[in-house]
């Protein structure tokens, strides 16, 4: 499946420390043409974890608009996954949340 950038999706989130995966929400960061060309999707973690925080966490203010069921945040835990492993889409991130996520992620790679 190919998804638009800023789509919230559900997929088997890979855990590096457990060697397993758990069904979780994620945010699509790659454009559709990247997914089509490479057969992979670039995503970032979406979490509702209240007990842990990363300095780069972004609260998703309009989480319901993206199809997310409870308050959550975007976490800069980035990964690629084969397109066909994405289970389904939920919705699309609101413009205000897109801008905040972009502000955090734009400094991750050199220009």
Image (spheres, rainbow, N blue to C red):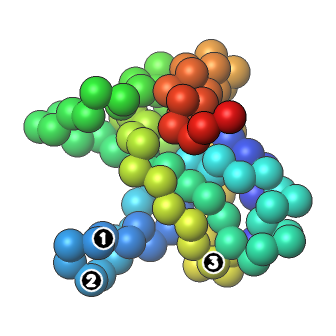
* Residue 78 badge: none
Quadrant of the image occupied by residue 37: bottom right
**Residue at image point 57% right, 72% down:** 81
* Residue 82 badge: 3
Task: Tell me where residue 44 appears, x and y as whole percent.
Answer: 50, 50
- Looking at the image, is 3 positioned above or below residue 56? below
Q: Are marks 2 and 1 in contact (CB under 8 Å)?
A: yes
Q: Which residue is mark 2?
A: 19
Quadrant of the rendering where the C terminus is positioned: top right
| Residue 101 makes an appearance in the image | no
- Looking at the image, is 80 positioned above or below residue 59? below
**Residue at image point 43% right, 37% down:** 74
Cα separation, mark 3 vs mark 1, equals 15 Å
**Residue at image point 68% right, 72% down:** 40
* Residue 15 badge: 1
Cα separation, mark 2 vs mark 1, equals 6 Å
Q: How many marks?
A: 3
Quadrant of the image occupied by residue 80: bottom right
- Looking at the image, is 12 positioned above or below residue 26? below
Secondary structure found at label 2: loop
Front-most of residues 57 and 108: 108
Quadrant of the rendering where the N terminus is positioned: bottom right
Residue neighbourhood size for the residue with mark 1, other residues' Cα within 10 Å, grouped as few (<14), some (14–19), many (≥20): few
């Amino acid at each position: 499946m190919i998804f638009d950038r800023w789509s919230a999706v559900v997929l088997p989130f890979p855990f590096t420390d457990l060697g397993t995966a758990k069904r979780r929400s994620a945010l699509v960061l790659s454009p559709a043409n990247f997914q089509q060309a490479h057969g992979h999707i670039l995503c970032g973690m979406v979490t509702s974890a209240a007990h842990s925080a990363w300095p780069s966490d972004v609260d998703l203010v309009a989480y319901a608009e993206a199809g997310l069921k409870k308050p959550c945040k975007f976490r800069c835990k980035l990964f690629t996954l084969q397109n066909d492993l994405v289970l389904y889409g939920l919705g699309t991130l609101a413009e205000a949340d897109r801008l905040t996520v972009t502000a955090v992620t734009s400094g991750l790679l050199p220009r």
